[in-house]
Image: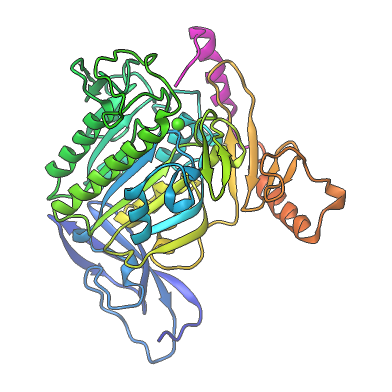
């Protein structure tokens, strides 16, 4: 039992030498609730309970504490592996565990029923904007340049994990710059990617790049299978050390073509124009689910599943040509739109060591929140200037999530178009920069802005809170980012496609 009065922060420093920790200093009567460390120096910030005389100084050896909060302080030798999988163009409505009724997703459903399923994860409406937010932990307002590009100056979670001594890998879809060294430049030691230096087919007889070196296939190989094999090989190779694998999957984006499990599978297909039919989306979803299941199984077979944090999300809503059955109704994909069917994605977290009982969360989660969360799980210090909020404590049992609202600055920039959608929202209300205010429960498609002079009391309160939140971003866009975009278009004159 704690007898606390005023909390204050004390600092404890550990020097890490060849993997061993040595206590250097302890100040105050302390109880660790939170800590951060890098490879060489580990600093614990201890929330100190200044108490009555019952409490004496704590001598803390390493980070092993016998306390109700000790789970939040992982020792350096038990840092988790992290596998972050992101499905391309895959909305919330496509997963059985969420109430999806159109496609079998047995592996996602199993991971959700044994781990943590989140009901309110929102990302950007389009590929590159979400990837930039996910990798940097910052809103697009801060650092988004244009479609298909990640600013070479950006610091990513790849850098952070690499600097902390993790083996880092990326596989799947890149779309963030054609430089041969781009994945390594952004902190990934090993890379197996599509849409890195060029843009060949992704599915049947694909073209991929292994660490920037082109590989072309023409014997009926299937891109997602090849990438999944790389993922499994990466995991096997690093099974005895900590690793971070970022796996932005190629599936389930169009072109909707047959998979090797489809009845009309055709290994002779050479282009992305052949055999396209939206009917294949369901088969692609189930194949993606199979790939997730193989990763889960592989971790288990290697004996490292328990302390591997496995996260699965989508990068934006489903393609608008796909209509699915969801919770008893028809639900059309909304990719590219700022309505919820464009931004609401599945989110499943599985970490058997620390998430021991299945849970369903109604926390608001942003694509900026994953960087600080996986860093906290790995004991990696989060840099200043990150917009995301860690949901680590929520994941481990704290009933409330870290956010009251979600913020979006979204601009496609696939052509010379500076149109920006900026808004703040919660589970029910959404306020745009232009003043449009919607009740999402009554107006899912956002067709009828509420009359501000006729709001209910609860709507009035929500409006005031969202307006105040939006005001915190007034004038925050660095105008040099837009200038760089305009200059790049003037020089290239080209457009970007997915
Ligand atoms: Ca996408």
Residue 251 in picture, x, y percent from top left = 36, 32
Q: Look at the image and tell me whether residue 155 can be seen.
A: no
Q: Does residue 18 appear to the left or right of 49 in the view shown? A: left
Q: Magenta segment range?
A: 476-498
Q: Residue furthest bottom?
A: 54
Q: Give the image quarter of residue 24.
A: bottom left
What secondary structure is the magenta-colored segment mainly? helix
Q: Quadrant of ligand 1?
A: top left
Tell me which residue sits at (41%, 48%) in the image. 370
Residue 426 in picture, x, y percent from top left = 62, 52
Q: Look at the image and tell me whether residue 35 can be seen.
A: yes
Q: Nearer the viewer, residue 77 or 276?
A: 276
Residue 314 in picture, x, y percent from top left = 43, 40
Residue 276 in picture, x, y percent from top left = 41, 20
Q: Quadrant of the C terminus?
A: top left
Q: Residue furthest right?
A: 453
Tell me which residue sits at (31%, 60%) in the image. 43
Vertical order, 64 against 126 (above or below): below
Tell me which residue sits at (32%, 52%) in the image. 380
Vertical order, 79 against 443 (above or below): below
Q: Quadrant of the N terminus?
A: bottom left
């Amino acid at each position: 039992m704690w007898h606390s009065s005023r909390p204050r922060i004390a600092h404890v420093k550990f020097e890490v030498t060849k993997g061993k920790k040595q206590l250097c200093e302890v100040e105050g009567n302390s109880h660790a609730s939170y800590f951060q460390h890098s490879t060489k120096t580990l600093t614990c910030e201890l929330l100190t309970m200044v108490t009555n005389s019952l409490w004496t100084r704590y001598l803390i050896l390493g980070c092993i504490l016998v306390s109700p909060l000790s789970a939040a302080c992982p020792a350096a030798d038990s840092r988790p592996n992290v596998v972050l999988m992101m499905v391309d163009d895959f909305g919330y409505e496509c997963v059985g565990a969420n109430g999806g009724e159109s496609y079998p997703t047995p592996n996602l459903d199993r991971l959700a029923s044994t781990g943590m399923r989140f009901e309110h994860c929102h990302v950007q409406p389009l590929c590159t904007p979400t990837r930039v937010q996910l990798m940097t932990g910052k809103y697009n307002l801060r650092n988004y340049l244009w479609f298909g590009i990640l600013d070479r100056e950006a610091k990513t979670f790849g850098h952070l994990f690499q600097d902390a001594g993790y083996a880092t890998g990326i596989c799947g879809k890149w779309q963030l710059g054609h430089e041969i060294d781009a994945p390594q430049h952004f902190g990934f030691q090993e890379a197996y990617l599509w849409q890195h230096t060029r843009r060949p087919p992704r599915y049947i007889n694909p073209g991929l790049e292994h660490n920037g070196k082109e590989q072309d296939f023409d014997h009926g190989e299937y891109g997602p299978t090849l990438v999944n094999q790389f993922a499994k090989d990466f995991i096997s190779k690093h099974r005895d050390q900590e690793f971070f694998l970022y796996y932005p999957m190629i599936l389930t984006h169009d072109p909707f073509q047959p998979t090797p499990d489809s009845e009309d599978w055709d290994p002779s297909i050479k282009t992305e124009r052949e055999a396209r039919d939206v009917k294949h989306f369901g088969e692609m979803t189930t194949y993606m689910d199979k790939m997730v299941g193989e990763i889960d199984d592989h971790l288990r077979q290697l004996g490292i599943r328990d302390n591997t944090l496995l996260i699965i999300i989508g990068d934006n809503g489903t393609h608008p040509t796909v209509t699915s059955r969801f919770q008893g109704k028809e639900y059309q994909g909304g990719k590219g739109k700022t309505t919820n069917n464009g931004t609401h994605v599945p989110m499943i977290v599985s970490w058997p060591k620390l998430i021991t009982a299945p849970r369903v969360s109604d926390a608001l989660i942003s694509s900026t929140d994953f960087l600080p969360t996986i860093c906290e799980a790995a004991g990696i210090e989060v840099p200043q200037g990150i917009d995301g909020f860690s949901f680590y404590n929520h994941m481990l049992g704290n009933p409330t999530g870290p956010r009251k609202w979600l913020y979006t600055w979204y601009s496609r920039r696939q052509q010379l178009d500076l149109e920006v959608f900026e808004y703040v929202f919660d589970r029910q209300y959404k306020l745009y920069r232009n003043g449009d205010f919607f009740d999402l429960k009554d107006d899912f498609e956002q067709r009828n802005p509420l009359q501000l002079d006729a709001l209910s009391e609860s709507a009035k309160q929500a409006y005031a809170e969202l307006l105040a939140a939006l005001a915190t971003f007034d004038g925050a866009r660095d105008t040099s980012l837009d200038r760089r975009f305009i200059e790049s278009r003037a020089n290239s004159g080209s457009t970007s496609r997915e």
